[in-house]
Image (spheres, rainbow, N blue to C red):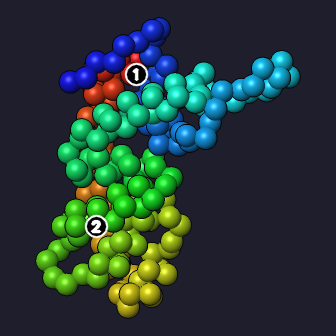
Amino acid sequence: NHTYVQISEPLFRFSTDALMFAFRYSGEQYALSPVAKMMGLRGGSGKGLSGLDGAAQAGMIRDEVGRLNPNERDCIIARYSVTKDGLQAKINLIPLAASALPTGMHSRRMVDQLVQRYFGKKMAIAELSESFGIERRTMHNRWLDIAKRLRETEDRAGIMIHDRLVSSGLVE
């Protein structure tokens, strides 16, 4: 269990805010120049963090995510990351998603598409069923099985990361 030194109160009220910040923080966010400050421009994350301070805070949050079990970690990264890390996390979740399906042969590509759908990619069940030559009702049932498994894992991950972020002093 890591404890980070806090100069003031935690910057994040909710763990979801901390996760969005950590996985969307760009190393290219720098402190405002004196001229920009005089002009009243805003920069950074909206949390008063930019440059190395912001990168450090994002890194501490990501470190806590990295300490989760692989499936829970991948659910958090898949939900919040907008980089190739998020895509890799979704790929890592394919075996977990496939394990929710009844025994038999399942197209890895189909399971991948349903994982992508769970994490927000727009695609209709009708399109998927046509694309994979599976009856619409069967595809819908497979979607429900995969969505349930991923939701259970993501819910567990949310509880675990919330507890870690609170105990480390990163979140209220």
Q: In the image, what residue occupies the spot 45% across and 33% down?
A: 58
Label 2 SS: helix
> Where does the image place residue 111, in percent across and percent down from the top left?
32, 73
Q: Tell me the SS state at disc 1.
A: loop
Assign the C terminus to one quadrant of the image.
top left
Please tell me which of labels 2 and 1 falls first in the chain: 2
Residues marked 2 and 1 touching at CB (< 8 Å) = no
Examine the image and state in which quarter residue 39 appears: top right
Write down the quadrant of residue 30 in the picture: top right
Is 103 above or below relative to 19? Answer: below
The mark tally for this picture is: 2
State the residue at coordinates (42%, 50%).
79
Residue visible at 49% across and 19% down in the picture: 11
Residue that sits furthest to the right in the current view:
39
Q: Which labelled disc corresponds to residue 171?
A: 1
Q: Amino acid at mark 1?
A: Val
Q: Label 2, on which residue?
A: 94
* Residue 153 locus on image (x, y percent): 26, 49
Estimate how packed mark 2 is, as few (under 14), some (14 to 19) or many (20 or more) residues with alpha carbons within 10 Å: many
Quick check: can you spot residue 9? yes
- State the quadrant of the N terminus: top left
Q: Residues within 10 Å of mark 1 (few under 14, many from 20)?
A: many
User: Where 147 sits versus 29, above or below?
Assistant: below
Q: Which of 105/24 is in front?
A: 24
